[in-house]
Amino acid sequence: MESGSGHAFVKTDRNSGPAGGIGDRHPVLTALLFNQARPTSDMRSPSFAAGIVGHVAVLLMAQAVAAAAPVVDRVSITPTSRGDGYVIRLHSSDYIHAFTDATSPASGRYEVVLFNAAVGPDYIRDEPEGPILHYDFHSRDAHLVFGFRMDASEPYRVDVYRDRGSNDLLVGLIYDPSAQGKTTQAVAPPTNGPSVQARDRWKLDTIVIDAGHGGKDAGAVSGGVREKEVVLEVGKKLGQYLTQQLGVRVVFTREDDRFIELKERGRIANEAGGKLFVSLHCNSARRRSAQGTETYFLGMHKSEAARDVMDRENSVVRFEENASEYENFDEQELIRMALAQSAYMHKSEMLASQIERQFSDRVQRNSRGVHQAGFYVLWSASMPAVLVELGFLTHSGERAFLASESGQAYMASAIFRAIRDFKNQYERELNITTTAG
């Protein structure tokens, strides 16, 4: 079973159940799958729904592993859109359920294990380019190993992640001078907790800030205040706080007034090796008295109000060149997306709760709570991800507050404190000593 980006893998049998198969080897997993709690009001909570999605994902994985192995039939290599590296795309015929991070068994050599996968005998391959000198495939214990060699003197950071729009896996090579001389060695993990490699891989060192809308898409507009301008200013302040006080790397999907397509925002986050994705927005309503903050994570909406917010934010696809790509986005597709994001759901909900708590306790905002909905922009980010509604521009008091520099600073500070607390808690769980106060 995959956890996070695929560090752990659980082999399953075709005939699994309480009497054998999974149950014989994994009694805890059996308890989760077959001893569900009796129906209560708690089952309507986001955390319960996230748990159910996780259980369903395990069942789907058990079925998929028994099926034919996915086949890598092409390897393509392209520069990143920002010109700061390259992306190796492993084109797969089917969903690859588990894979490892890139390890370096020798200087300049990297390997990624694709569990229960195979390579096509006549696969199409691009010629190596950029820092890539050579690449190859070989099998190891019935699994597929993708290996590649780079110039050891070139400082590139290597990340492996999924392409949300296909079955492909992506290996990102991002030029990073701070990576000079740092090599991730393939070592056996200690028995008393996560390996150093795993802890370093998941340390929250890169945070992506997504200021919604921009350019030709103004977002919500009321009383002369435009959403795209408010969220950009809050995002810049948040980035400054994170950089100066936490020392993390901050990546912006936009830093000026430009339009960025929704799927491109997630791609920027993935290519940058982001560990956390925060999308900033402002709300609006026909009812002028509506006010308050809301924070969302990906999932099925449970109210018409949540659906209305989702529809409004998703409607920006009308500005995109290929809006038809979203025509097949229905409830079934949302369920599939939620399953793909199930590894991050709990952390996303945890961050959303901390953000709303800070809004309420520290900034005295009216918190409307944490919700789930099917936002396109959250689906495309392969990491814990939240969408924050800072308040209603259609409410005169909130509009004035959010348009003011002090109000923007307060909101950015609240989100910063929530991320700081989330980071400390998250890294304590990984046995990482942090310096954030």
Image: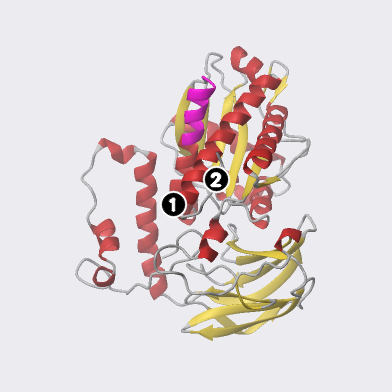
What x and y, as percent, mark residue 181?
71, 68
Which secondary structure type mostly characterizes the magenta part of the structure? helix
Residue 393, located in which quarter of the rendered image?
top right
Q: Residues within 10 Å of mark 1 (few under 14, many from 20)?
A: few
The tag earlier along the polypeptide, 2 or 1, is 2
Which three-letter amino acid code belongs to the residue tagged 1?
Answer: Glu
Name the residue located 54 percent from the left edge and 16 percent from the top edge. 287
Give the spatial CA distance, label 2 vs label 1.
Answer: 19 Å
What x and y, as percent, mark residue 186?
56, 75
Which mark is nearer the camera, 2 or 1? 1
Where disc 1 sits, the SS reads helix
Q: How many marks?
A: 2
Q: Does residue 187 lie above or below 247 as drawn?
A: below
Which three-letter amino acid code belongs to the residue tagged 2?
Answer: Ala
Q: Is residue 97 magenta?
A: no
Check contact, mark 2 vs mark 1: CB within 8 A.
Answer: no
Residue stretch rendered in magenta on the structure = 354-364
| Residue beneath disc 2 | 385
Quadrant position of the N terminus in the picture: bottom left
- Does residue 156 appear to the left or right of 282 in the view shown? right
